[in-house]
Image: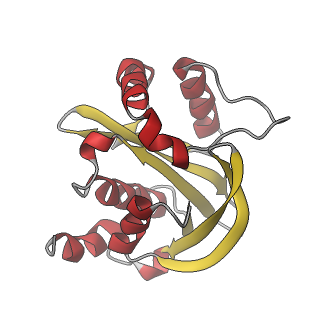
Amino acid sequence: MRPLAYSDARAWRESRRRNATWLRPWDATVPPGSDARPSTFRSLVWRLHKQARAGTTYPFAVEVDGHFAGQITVNNIVRGSAQFASIGYWLDREYAGRGVMPRAVAMVIDHCFVIAKLHRIEIAIRPENSNSLRVVEKLGLREIGYAPRFLHIDGSWRDHRIYAVTVDECPEGMLARLKPHESHE
C-alpha cells in the first residue's frame, strides 16, 4: 500500500482497460445531471490529492511485487463526533483470489484507526458482488444494514449491503484479525 501517484498513470490506465468488462458491474458512475467525473487520470489524482490535503479522502495504490494491482480509496471522512469514513476498492483481475484485497483493506483500515485516528469504517457492497463479499467475510466485518438504491453503479442506482467495523472491535488491528483466516486457505 502506498499513496496513489501521478506516476501510476500508465499502469492504472492499462489495468482499467484490461479489466473494463470485469469491473463495469461494480464501478461507480455519475448519475445524469451530476458533476462529471475527472476526464483524465491526472485530473483524478489531482482531485484526490486535493481532497487528501483537506482530510476528506485518502487514495492508495495497491502493489503486488512492485506492480500496480488496484486502488483503495478512503472516502467521506467525517471528523467531529463521528470520526467515520467509508472505503471503496478495485483490483486487477490478474491478482484476484490471492488474498491481496483482504490484506490491502486490512492495512488501510489499520492506517485509518492508528494514524488517522478514525473510530468507524464502513464498506458498501452490491449484493451480487461475491468477490467483495468474500473480502469483508475474511476480515470479519459485520453486516449492519441494507441500503436500497444506495450508490450509482454501472449506470443505475443500486442496492448495497453495508458492513462496518469500529476500532474497539479490533484492538490488535485488522491485519492481525485477518491472519487466522489466511491460514485456512
Residue at 52% in and 52% down: 88
Closer to the camera in the image, 74 or 144: 144
Q: Using the image, determine if residue 61 lies above or below residue 138.
A: above
Residue 4 occupies quadrant? top left
Q: Using the image, determine if residue 144 lies above or below residue 156.
A: below
All told, the count of numbered labels is: 0
Q: Residue lying at the far right in this picture: please name it.
A: 33
Is 134 left, or right, of 184 in this rendering? right
Is 98 left, or right, of 112 in this rendering? left
Residue at 37% in and 64% down: 135
Closer to the camera in the image, 58 or 105: 105
Closer to the camera in the image, 139 or 49: 139
Q: Using the image, determine if residue 117 lies above or below residue 172.
A: above
Closer to the camera in the image, 51 or 179: 179
Does residue 116 appear in the picture of this structure? yes
Q: What percent of the width, then of the height, locates residue 7?
A: 39, 19
Q: What percent of the width, then of the height, locates residue 117?
A: 52, 62
Residue at 51% in and 75% down: 166
Is 45 left, or right, of 102 in this rendering? right
Residue 48 occupies quadrant? top right
Q: What percent of the width, then of the height, locates residue 62?
A: 34, 41
Q: Quadrant of the N terminus?
A: top left
Q: Residue lying at the far front in this picture: please name it.
A: 21
Residue 107 occupies quadrant? bottom left
Q: How is the image coloured?
A: secondary structure
Residue at 43% in and 60% down: 132
Q: Quadrant of the C terminus?
A: bottom left
Is 75 left, or right, of 100 in this rendering? right
Q: What percent of the width, then of the height, locates residue 61?
A: 39, 38
Does residue 119 appear in the picture of this structure? no
